[in-house]
Image: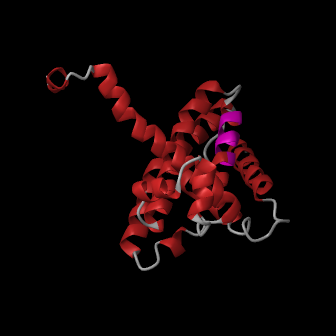
Amino acid sequence: MADAESGQSPVAHARSVGRPRRSEKALLDAAAAVFVTSGVDAPVRKIAAKAGVGVGTIYRHFPTRPELVVAVYRHQVEACADAGPRLLAESATPEAALREWVALFAEFLVTKHGLAGALRGDNAGADALHTYFVERLVPVCDSLLEAALTSIDADPPVDAYNVLKGIGNLCISAESDTHYEAAELVQLLISGVLARGAD
């Protein structure tokens, strides 16, 4: 009714509503890419250049750096969560889906580095993000792990929470040591979990 009174068609209204969301997603994708290469303290102008927008546009969406970092973190969590069911449906085997997903998860952890510094003094905010992270990603990992183990008629030797915790611990040194092969170690961890489950 409001659309009819304003003279704006429902399609036009949907497009105008959708544009800011697409724009924000592009900014978050750009920020995530910059954080991977330059850390969460990277200059805002670098993120703006990557996104192809002006610096003012970044500040309009995210007035402070902690807000930007938290938004990138949440965006990456959602992307990682959404990838699980998609990979399970598209991959040749459940094991292939699990392996690709844990590789994505390990890559996500790189953008997570520096979050504590950006949220310095906001313990409640950091705790809320950790809870959100666990609630979103543990069930996704659990479904992938269960599918992979079922496909080889194996029992779970460890739960999904501990698999993610193990991957997190393996990734800790990846940012500061260029010789450290976290991605390979993560895959070896998955090989161990699957082999132990098949015992």
The foreground one among 149 and 30 is 30
* Residue 166 position in % (x across, y down): 64, 60
Q: Nearer the viewer, residue 185 or 41?
A: 41
Looking at the picture, tell me which residue is in the foreground, 139 or 41: 41
Is residue 16 found left or right of 141 in the rendered image? left
Task: Tell me, yes or no, whether the highlighted magenta stretch contains residue 99.
Answer: yes
Q: At 30% across and 27% down in the image, what residue appears?
A: 13
Q: x, y percentage for residue 167?
A: 66, 58
- Magenta span includes 149: no
Q: Residue drawn 52% across and 49% down?
A: 27
| Position of 95 relative to 75 (above/below) | above
**Apparent side of residue 146 relative to residue 180 in the rendered image (left or right):** left
Q: Residue at x 42, y 35 (%)?
A: 19
Boundaries of the magenta span: 96-103
Q: Position of residue 3 (x, y in %)?
A: 20, 24
Q: Quadrant of residue 63?
A: bottom left
Estimate the x, y position of residue 26 in percent, counting from the top left. 53, 43
Can residue 125 be seen?
yes
Residue 89 against residue 163 in the figure, above or below = above
Q: Work out which quarter of the rendered image holds the C terminus and state it.
A: top right
In this view, the residue in front, 133 or 7, is: 7
Q: With respect to residue 11, does 199 lie above or below?
A: below
Residue 178 is drawn in which quadrant? bottom right
